[in-house]
Image (spheres, rainbow, N blue to C red):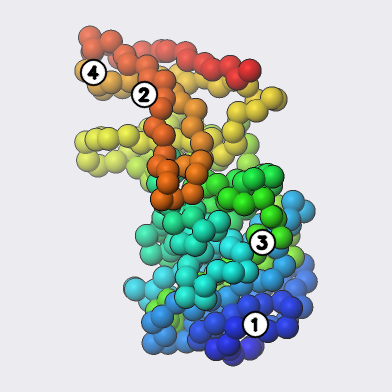
């Protein structure tokens, strides 16, 4: 273990605060121990100095210990991020916050997908699914399932450094850096269990249906999103409405970006969509096929 309150150590890590971590050479399958000392309340920072790449696009952590007010942020940031900042709350960075479940990109948390809170025993991760010239796309994972997508702005992939911030110890993590992670998670839009959905929406494998399972009356919108975008080889999708409450508007079928196109504060998410409303005659069930083709 290595105790630090400084900034840069060798060529592998940049660190600040009361973090204790394994300062070792990373090998496949190796779990690195990362801990925050008890009573440490300020933001504590650890950054791995080797960037994510198309071959190694993924890293993750399992929570072993935390308190009721602990905050863990797992994300991606450049080497210039301030040591007292969380990834996602810095320009051209992304981060997944444990205490709220919110996922940030360049200070912005507004998007179609919101993320989920996590606690002891949960495994949460960050996966770059596309490395672009001006921006890339990121999926945040909880216990192996996609929970949110965000853009990561900036085309310099050498700045895509795995970064974590910790507040309010004690915190204990088992972390796999990109070089340690064995394989890359694979997700398919054909597998409905891989679609990103709110906690109140369940997927019934037997009926092949998404069902609202919340206890309260549905108000507002619930968004279900594919883990992958439409593309040249995936140009079409269909939605079949099997059952709904009478006198209720139908669902919206939409194309949208995974988060706002321009970093905050100059942009918010455009909520344009195509909406199909059912007749208000109370007939149920109703079968409606909708489709889109991308040219």
- Going from N to C along the chain, the mark reached first, 1 or 3, is 1
Residue located at (72% from left, 76% from top): 12
Q: Callout 2: 10 Å neighbours few (<14), some, many (20+)?
A: some
- Asked if residue 206 is positioned above or below residue 84 in the image, the reply reads above
Task: Residue 25 in the image: state x and y as whole percent.
Answer: 76, 78
- Going from N to C along the chain, the mark reached first, 4 or 3, is 3
Cα distance between the residues tagged 4 and 2: 13 Å
Task: Name the residue carrying label 2.
Answer: 251
Q: Are marks 4 and 1 in contact (CB under 8 Å)?
A: no
Considering the numbered disc 2 on the image, is that residue within a helix, a strand or a loop? loop
In the image, 145: left or right of 113? right
Cα distance between the residues tagged 4 and 1: 62 Å
Residue located at (58% from left, 50% from top): 153
Q: Are marks 2 and 3 in contact (CB under 8 Å)?
A: no
Of circles 4 and 1, which is in front?
1
Task: Name the residue carrying label 1.
Answer: 8
Task: Name the residue carrying label 3.
Answer: 159
In the image, 48: left or right of 217? right
Mark number displayed over residue 246: 4
Q: Judge by depth and name the residue closer to the eye, 156 or 179.
A: 156
- Going from N to C along the chain, the mark reached first, 4 or 1, is 1
């Amino acid at each position: 273990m290595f105790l630090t309150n400084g900034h840069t150590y060798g060529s592998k890590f940049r660190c600040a605060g009361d973090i204790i971590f394994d300062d070792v050479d990373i090998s496949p399958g190796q779990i690195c121990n990362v801990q925050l000392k008890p009573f440490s309340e300020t933001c504590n920072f650890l950054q791995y100095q080797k960037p994510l790449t198309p071959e190694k696009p993924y890293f993750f952590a399992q929570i072993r210990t935390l308190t009721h007010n602990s905050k863990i942020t797992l994300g991606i940031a450049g080497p210039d991020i301030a040591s007292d900042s969380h990834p996602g709350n810095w320009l051209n960075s992304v981060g997944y916050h444990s205490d709220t479940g919110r996922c940030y990109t360049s200070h912005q948390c507004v998007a179609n997908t919101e993320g989920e809170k996590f606690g002891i025993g949960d495994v949460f991760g960050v996966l770059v699914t596309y490395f672009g010239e001006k921006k890339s796309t990121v999926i945040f994972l909880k216990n192996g399932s996609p929970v949110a997508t965000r853009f990561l702005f900036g085309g310099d992939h050498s700045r895509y450094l795995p970064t974590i911030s910790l507040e309010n110890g004690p915190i204990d993590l088992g972390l796999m850096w990109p070089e340690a992670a064995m394989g890359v998670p694979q997700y398919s839009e054909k597998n409905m269990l891989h679609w990103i959905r709110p906690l109140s929406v369940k997927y019934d494998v037997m009926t092949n249906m998404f069902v609202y399972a919340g206890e309260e009356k549905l108000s507002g919108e619930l968004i279900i999103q594919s883990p992958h975008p439409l593309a040249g080889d995936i140009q079409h999708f269909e939605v079949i409405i099997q059952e709904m409450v009478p006198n209720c508007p139908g669902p919206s079928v939409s194309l949208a970006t995974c988060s706002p196109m321009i970093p905050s504060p100059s942009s918010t998410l455009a909520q344009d969509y195509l909406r199909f409303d059912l007749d208000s005659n109370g007939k149920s069930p109703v079968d409606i096929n909708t489709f889109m083709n991308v040219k």
